[in-house]
Amino acid sequence: MTMTMTMNTIEVDRLCKTYPVALKEPGFVNTVRHFFQRRYRYIEAVKPLSFTIAEGEIVGFLGPNGAGKTTTLKMLTGLIRPSGGSARIAGYEPFLRDSTLLCQMSIVMQRIATISFTED
């Protein structure tokens, strides 16, 4: 009996991204106060996310605007560092920007506004 093992090409465990956003009140005095003592609120761009994708598997990444799709893809390609969790692509951590991994992957981002649906 022959067993084949499927290697997970992408392994994501509790990957998340939170951005700090400085709070500032209007007015000159508050601008000076803001310069010396900042207060922040935190925006959760990607809530903790876990999944695996096996070699040869085809997946779609769907969700409404602001759901964190682009942020997740940027973390998986190493363009931005996650706030927490871990990800491994073909055994590499993408945010370490290892040249071996970078030579094996690419991402093409396109905004729908740049696509023309009419003939010129």
Image (tube, helix red, strand yellow):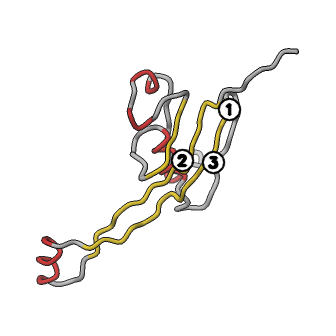
Q: Nearer the viewer, residue 56 or 65?
A: 56
Do residues under tags 1 and 3 come within 8 Å of each other at their CB atoms? Answer: no
Q: Residue lying furthest top in this view?
A: 1
> 9 left or right of 98?
right
- Which numbered tag is attached to residue 61? 3
Question: Disc 2 or 1, which lies upstream in sequence?
Answer: 1
Question: Disc 2 or 3, which lies upstream in sequence?
Answer: 3
Do residues under tags 2 and 3 come within 8 Å of each other at their CB atoms? Answer: no
Q: How far across and down, in percent of the image, does residue 19 sit?
A: 38, 60
List the residue tagged with mark 2. Answer: 115
Q: Residue at x 50, y 23 (%)?
A: 104
Q: Residue at x 77, y 20 (%)?
A: 4
> 104 left or right of 22?
right
The quarter of the rendered structure image containing the C terminus is top right
Compared to residue 85, the image places residue 101 above or below, namely: above
The quarter of the rendered structure image containing the N terminus is top right
Question: Disc 1 or 3, which lies upstream in sequence?
Answer: 1
Compared to residue 68, the image places residue 2 above or below, namely: above
- Dot in front, 2 or 1: 1
Q: Residue at x 41, y 53 (%)?
A: 83
Give the amino acid at mark 3: Phe
- Disc 1 secondary structure class: strand
List the residue tagged with mark 1. Answer: 54
Measure the C-alpha gap from mark 2 to mark 3: 20 Å
- Dot in front, 1 or 3: 1
Q: Residue at x 25, y 77 (%)?
A: 24
Q: How far across and down, in percent of the image, does residue 6 sit?
A: 71, 26
Do residues under tags 2 and 1 come within 8 Å of each other at their CB atoms? Answer: no
Q: How far across and down, in percent of the image, does residue 74 sit?
A: 46, 44
- Disc 3 secondary structure class: loop
